[in-house]
Image (cartoon, grey):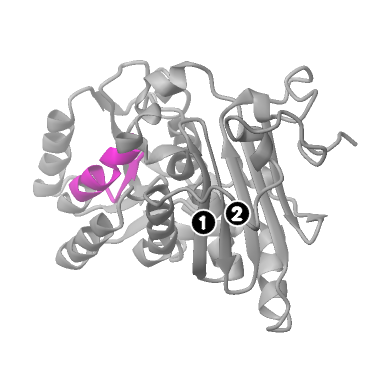
Amino acid sequence: MTNFALIGAAGYIAPRHLKAIHAVGGKLIAAADPKDSVGVLDQYFPTASFFTEIERFDRFLERLRREGSSDRIDYLSVCSPNYLHDAHTRLGLRVRAHVVCEKPLTITPWNIDALAELEAEYERRVYTVLQLRLLPSLRELKERIAASPPDKRPQVQLSYVTRRGPWYQISWKGDAAKSGGVAMNIGIHFFDLLLWIFGGCRRYELHLSEPTKMAGMLELEHADVTWLLSIDSDDLPAGYMDSGRPAFRSLTMDGEELEFSSGFTELHTEVYRDILAGGGYGLDDARPSVELVHNIRTSEVVVSPALAHPALARTRKGGPQVVPSWPPPEE
């Protein structure tokens, strides 16, 4: 049996990791979180030790390692706030465990270099959760793009609007220094997906940068992309909230809708299975999107872009309130 520990047990994403660890036959030895609202542990691992102080958690894991206990951990799952990911990953490596870290792996590119050095020093691996890469429909799209004529440049439009209430800005997620801002916190897996499918970024522009929404353009090796990310419910298509749909996800290529929504909540188990089978995505896989998002969010806004997402005029402060092509009409 494979032994796990988990940091961030009270967080939003932890239940997906707990479910995945349980599904692959793993055993959760210990969990940690400064908050003690972790009753979810009883659903999957009712005998796991729990700590609200990271120092005691660290000490416990180190004791298991030094004593050669059968409960010494093989993997540490990191589900803590973004700005702590690299620190908690280092903790896992120090106790000689492999690490499965939620995205973003880090919010600054240079911290990936430090993790690479520790990987080599402790002879352990750091994996990150890029579950959309495992979605069959997107794997097929990647193969299709690779086989396309080199002179063909698809026009891609990415739209992701997911409602978040006032709590979001009060929490660590609303602090860009801790979350990396909207592009990093809710957009990192989309940027990874775009780079993975359409190749490296030649040029980028930032067209809108506000605490609740961002938009821009990417010129990738094999596609031109306009993108919008928003946590403002006013940007949802008409009727979405009334029908109980608080999120809108759309990825189109030359007007053709590409299905990827099912990869959001159901693929964490596949990520764990892939890692335990000898696969998994590591530091080099995570680096391009972290670098790109860091560069985007620290760049100047282009006020009058030539190529922009159709929602830009509607979402930009002071712009017109209605744009016929956005939101898209209901079927």
Q: Is residue 213 above or below residue 220?
A: above
Q: Could you give the CA–CA distance between mark 2 and mark 1, rounded to whole angstroms?
A: 8 Å
* Occupied quadrant, residue 127: bottom left
Which amino acid type is shown beneath numbered disc 1? Answer: Glu
What residue is drawn where x is 67% and y is 60%? 138
Pick whichever, 321 or 133, lies toward us.
321
Seen in the picture, residue 271 relative to 199 is either above or below; the reply is above
Q: What percent of the width, then of the height, locates residue 211?
A: 45, 31
Asked whether the residues under the numbered discs 2 and 1 touch, taking CB atoms below 8 Å apart as contact, a structural biologist would say yes
Mark 2 lies on residue: 305
Q: Is residue 162 magenta?
A: no
Q: Position of residue 145 (x, y in %)?
A: 69, 73
Decide: few, some or many residues near mark 2? Use Cα within 10 Å; few <14, some 14-19, many ≥20. Answer: some
Asked whether residue 88 is drawn in magenta, I would say yes
What's the residue at 33%, 26% (across, down)? 47
Q: Secondary structure at mark 2?
A: loop
Left/right placement of residue 37 relative to residue 123 reads right
Give the magenta part as a residue range.
72-91
Residue closest to the far right: 331
Answer with mark 2 or mark 1, whichever residue precedes in sequence.
1
- In the drawing, what numbered circle is on residue 190? none
Q: Quadrant of the C terminus?
A: top right
* Amino acid type at mark 2: Pro
Is 225 situated left or right of 21 in this image? right
At horizontal 51% and vertical 30% (from top left) the residue drawn is 212
Q: Residue 3: give x, y in percent of width and height.
A: 32, 45
- The 10 Å Cα crowd at callout 1, few under 14, some 14 to 19, many 20 or more, is many
Provide the residue designation for mark 1.
Answer: 205
Rendered position, 294 above or below 64: below
- From the viewer's perspective, is the residue at label 2 or at label 1 nearer? 2
